[in-house]
Image: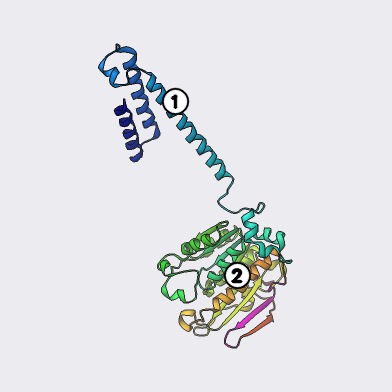
Amino acid sequence: MVLVVLSVIFWVWVLRKIGAPHAYGYALVGVISLAVLSVHLFLPDGHQLRAALGGSLRPWGILAILVGVVALYAKLLALIREKGAEKMPEKQDDGPFSTVELDRYARHIVLREIGGLGQQKLKAARVLVVGAGGLGSPILQYLAAAGVGRLGFIDDDVVSVSNLQRQVLFTEDDLDLPKVFAAEKRLGALNPHLDLRPYNRALTEEIAAELFADYDIVVDGTDSFATRALVNKTCVDLKMPLISGAISQWEGQVTVVDQTRNTPCMACLFPKEPAPGTAPSCAEGGVLGALPGIIGSIMAAEVVKVITGAGDPLYGRMLIYDALTVTVRTIEIARRDNCEVCGANRLVE
């Protein structure tokens, strides 16, 4: 009897290891059970085969009851675990805060300008960050920490060793990995209550409008004039708030564009691409490592303000920070009526 039981256990284990359907295991147990039942029903008492199989059906009945109790316990345990999983959603939604979330965002909630209502708005917000590099790193970190419910980020670059001087979201373990996937790993570890959406591709005109439509606010942290122009035009067309920032060497700037508030757009300020050599890239002209952290943090703060309605965001104004002289200026910027993107005579495609 013991040998039969051990044989059944062994073959069921083999079937599980090779990935066979559970039905195969059940069929095996059924066939063996039928064979044992037939031996005890049709062979006479004292037969050697009956003696080898326990002598009677009683020990088999006891074994069946024990197996049934264990199976029932396992099933109940699985159901309890399943119900528990249903009560713990993987991603954050716009429902009430859990106790953990209340503790996590306590310092925001006690701020009079944000409070519980403002934090709820952050939880329900959908923010897309274009670029996961120098500016994108601090923007993503602070928006994730702030509890922005859906956080998307698009970039087609990989992490290189030259990035580590300023892109503090990454480490040497991330070298040669797509930035968005390395960012997803870090942000998920920072705040597991978010809906993180990485897009490992370049932003193009073909996908921009459809992608932006899934979000409420766009944050531009890129260093390409063409990409910045595309982001600006798409946000203007969709009437979406845009937080735009830029850095170069020792200086950075931030502004907020929102057509619903009749603000100037980025094309009002920079209608044409700068001439070669007048606006060197980070690779060409260098950049202070801490500068993206300063400007990116300001951009993240503007996002929080726009979402919650706190304070006075940089609508129609541009903040300019100079790290060399440690000066901060805020200048008024005007909308151009002849702007081809947001002006009265804009080109309609």
Residue 125 visible, this orientation: no
Image: 72 above or below 172:
above
Nearest to the observer: residue 13 or residue 165: 13
Task: Name the quarter where the N terminus is drawn.
Answer: top left
Query: In the figure, 62 relative to 261: above or below?
Result: above
Question: Up-down: is 19 above or below 204?
Answer: above
Q: Which residue sits at x=32%, y=31%?
A: 6
Instruction: Note whether 33 is above or below 337 in the view shown.
Output: above
Image location of residue 114, percent across then percent down: 71, 64
Image coordinates of residue 42 in percent, x first then y, are: 32, 12
Q: Amino acid at mark 1?
A: Ile
Which portion, as a residue range, is magenta? Answer: 312-325
What residue occupies the far left of the structure in this picture?
48
**Could one spot residue 283 in this view of the protein?**
yes
Q: Quadrant of the C terminus?
A: bottom right
Left or right: residue 310 versus residue 215 is: right
Tell me which corner region of the image, top left, top right, bottom left or bottom right, holds residue 150: bottom right
For mark 2, what is the residue? 232
Q: Amino acid at mark 2?
A: Asn
Q: Which residue is mark 1?
A: 65
- Could you say which quadrant of the image residue 265 lies in? bottom right
